[in-house]
Amino acid sequence: MKDRVTPNHFQELTTIYEVSKVLSSSMDLEHTLNDVLKTLESHLHISPSMIVLRMNEEIVGVIAATGLSVAEIERGRYRLGEGMIGKIMRAGMPIVIPDVSQEPAFLHRAFEPEISQRLHAFVGVPIKVGYECIGVLAIYRSERHKGVSFRSDVRLLQMIANLVGQTVNLHQGISAERNRLLQEKHRLQKELQKRYSIKNVIGNSRAMQAVFADVHQAAPGKATVLLRGESGTGKEVIARAIHYLSPRRDKAFVSLNCAALPESILESELFGHERGAFTGATQERKGRFELADGGTLFLDEIGDISPAFQAKLLRVLQEREFERVGGTQTRRVNVRIITATNRNLEEAVSKGEFRADLYYRINVVSIFLPPLRERREDIPALIEHFLTRYNAENQRKLSLTPEALQTMVSCYWPGNVRELENCVERTATMMRGDIIRNLDVPCQRNQCLSMALRPLEGSHPIVTMKLSSGGSVPPPATPDVEEQVADASGAGDGEGSLPLSERDRLIQAMDRCGWVQAKAARLLGTTTRKLGYALNKHGVEVKKL
């Protein structure tokens, strides 16, 4: 004879279905469990009810309840083995008490006396994950259920307890993973702050100390910062240092090289796009401005963006609002902007290549990073840092002779710190022994750009600098152009030739640089202003080619 589905069975199935929907509706565990009990109250008129979960190895407490006040929930704490809740936790088996007034072991701890008197029956089932009991689902029946069999209650509550157990296990796993990720994020943030701290930027020269002072002054504020300097001087390192010294240090630092992307892709990268905005846009995508919300956005090579895109960028920098590509919704962000360029923006503005209004918008706080040739006293420390890192990464014990170090200090380094780092790595990689000698340095073998663009030959005034590893090296200081030309005048063009005069050497440098004073100044290791004084002094007329 087949079992018939009674109205009571149908009601229980409906309740289980509704409970399963509730359990999958939210990631807020406490809120979800309260909704489960409200579902039982709504469909089966069960109240009071409670869900008790393990709080530590010895104590369990009420997490969700219906028909209980806040004070009653707070009193719902039990030790393992204490009361009916504690016994269910320890034994892992359901307990039914048809009449709680006749059970001396039943504790009325959670209820006020007037409510406790109305309670008649207690049904509690364990909430398990595998074989481990992690909690209890308990309900109370009133006197009108006196003499009623509670077998159907136990069966229904056990099915619901199984669903609750799976949900609690899932939530606890997610919570544990989230806590682990938060701890890992906190650890990585501390490492980044330590790594990009201004204290870890190598620079004991007066020029770099001035940069550090500007960074400390600008970092706490919200003003837009423009980092200026030649390629390879470490503008992104300084940008990160500003971020990690600012109140935004716990938020994102997002960087983008504006010169590396065409205008069409650059707009999508910065502002994001909506689904279907263009071919291949299969889903919406946040741009760098949204990703950096609350943090810092670093725009490198800002001077190389097209005039058309400069107009689009101006509004965002001024109003901090934009629309995604293909979208109409205006989005606002709280982002600090740091820009960088190696171009002469003033000259670009005068030629109409760069918008003046955008220039004024980004040039709020300007920090100039000096080229490496203007802070040669920092080169030994930089070389030591790069060589130490290479040794640690490759299990080597390479060292540098004072002669090789002096040769590297004397190089022109048009690629600045980046070129110096690559030179150290290239030299160390090609070394078979453990000592890098003078002839092993690429400058000595004409294998680097520094040799091709180095200043005019001749001796340099030198200063002695102590190294942390012991010994000393005499790195050349940057002399005035007249001193440099005078020192170089003793070198002729060939064997037995007469020394060139200062005026001739100036003309020779200008010829090599196509009569571009800025290039000639870099070639001589001086400034354009000093070179102009020297040209006027010796009556050298600048040719217009």
Image (spheres, grey):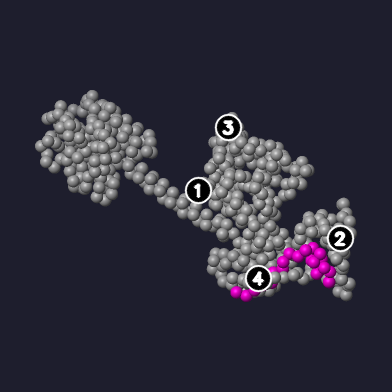
* Residue type for callout 4: Met
Distance of label 1 from label 4 (alpha carbons): 39 Å
Q: Counting residues from the N terminus, which is met first, the one under dot 1 or under dot 4?
A: 1
Q: Which residue is mark 3?
A: 330
Q: Residue at x 38, y 48 (%)?
A: 176
Position in image of residue 16 (x %, y %): 29, 32
Count neighbours of disc 3 (C-alpha within 10 A) and say few if under 14, some if 14 to 19, many if 20 or more: few
Q: Is residue 291 magenta?
A: no
Query: Tag on residue 250?
Result: 1
Left or right: 520 in relation to 154:
right
Name the residue at 64% across, 57% down: 210
Dot 2 lies on which element?
helix
Instruction: Mark yes or no: residue 326 visible.
Output: yes
Amino acid of disc 1:
Asp
Q: Quadrant of residue 458?
A: bottom right
Which labelled disc corresponds to residue 465?
A: 4
Residue at 85% in and 66% down: 502
